[in-house]
């Protein structure tokens, strides 16, 4: 089950990648779009009118996002669309409960979190694997490098990435010598042995 965040400017390539991944793993695909009027609109006497206008613009944008999703996602995929007027990070966190992978666009620079999800917050709080794609990026995943250090986070990331790792032509596990070569080599051999148990090249 894949959940993809649909946002202005980066949704087209993110959605294309999500469709490709859903096909690859025969997964269901849920599109999610959310935004809320910026809290800055509530300042001053004109705040209520500005808030109402912004809410109307968001409602229209969500309808367009749904139409785009339905037009671009093939009908042979099991698909659904969810939208709401709320903070997109909070909405994605809630909806990610029923997904195996959350896909969203990685947008450089400071974001307006009333319109764009906070990638870092979702990585830390969703409890699901998060795949953040740069604009225009498509995921081939035929050659994968695992930057290995024996930590809880790295162990979890490798376990979460197993479906992609299984489909790769080559997997390279690399680590950095931090001064305890014998222990580091032992831990590196252990993760490589574990990957071999899962049939990885």
Image (tube, grey):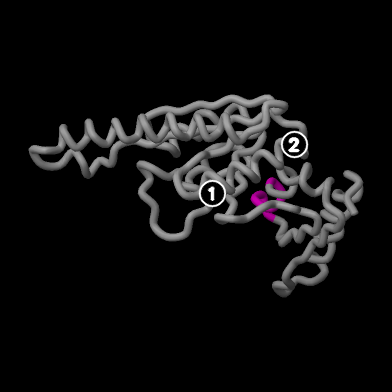
Question: Disc 1 designates what residue?
Answer: 105
- Check the picture and name the quadrant holding the C terminus: bottom right
Q: Is residue 93 visible?
A: no
Q: Is residue 29 above or below residue 40?
A: above
Q: Nearer the viewer, residue 61 or 130?
A: 61
Observer-side mark, 2 or 1, equals: 2
Q: Nearer the viewer, residue 113 or 135?
A: 135
Q: In the picture, residue 109 is in which quadrant? A: bottom left
Disc 2 versus disc 1: distance between alpha carbons? 19 Å
Give left or right: position of 195 versus 13.
right
Give left or right: position of 105 versus 52.
right
Q: Is residue 35 above or below residue 174?
A: above
Tell me which residue sits at (43%, 37%) in the image: 88
Question: Disc 2 designates what residue?
Answer: 23
Tell me which residue sits at (62%, 47%) in the image: 131
Residue 156 horizontal/vertical position (percent): 69, 46
SS for dot 2: helix
Q: Is residue 135 visible?
A: yes
Magenta span covers which residues? 151-156
Q: In the picture, residue 188 is in which quadrant? A: bottom right
Q: Is residue 127 above or below residue 81?
A: below
- Check the picture and name the quadrant holding the N terminus: top right
Tell me which residue sits at (31%, 35%) in the image: 57
């Amino acid at each position: 089950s894949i959940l993809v965040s649909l946002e202005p400017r980066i949704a087209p390539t993110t959605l294309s990648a999500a469709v490709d991944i859903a096909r690859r793993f025969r997964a269901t695909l849920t599109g999610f779009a959310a935004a809320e009027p910026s809290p800055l609109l509530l300042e001053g006497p004109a705040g209520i009118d500005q808030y109402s206008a912004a809410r109307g613009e968001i409602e229209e944008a969500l309808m367009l996002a749904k139409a785009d999703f339905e037009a671009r996602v093939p009908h042979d995929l099991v698909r659904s669309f969810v939208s709401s007027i709320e903070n997109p990070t909070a909405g994605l966190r809630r909806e990610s409960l029923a997904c195996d992978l959350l896909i969203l666009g990685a947008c450089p620079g400071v974001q307006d979190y009333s319109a764009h999800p906070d990638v870092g917050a979702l990585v830390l709080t969703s409890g699901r694997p998060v795949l953040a794609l740069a604009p225009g990026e498509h995921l081939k995943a035929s050659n994968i490098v695992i930057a290995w250090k024996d930590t809880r986070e790295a162990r979890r990331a490798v376990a979460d990435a197993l479906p992609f790792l299984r489909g790769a032509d080559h997997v390279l596990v690399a680590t950095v010598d931090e001064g305890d070569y014998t222990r580091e080599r032992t831990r590196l051999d252990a993760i490589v042995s574990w990957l071999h148990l899962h049939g990885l090249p």
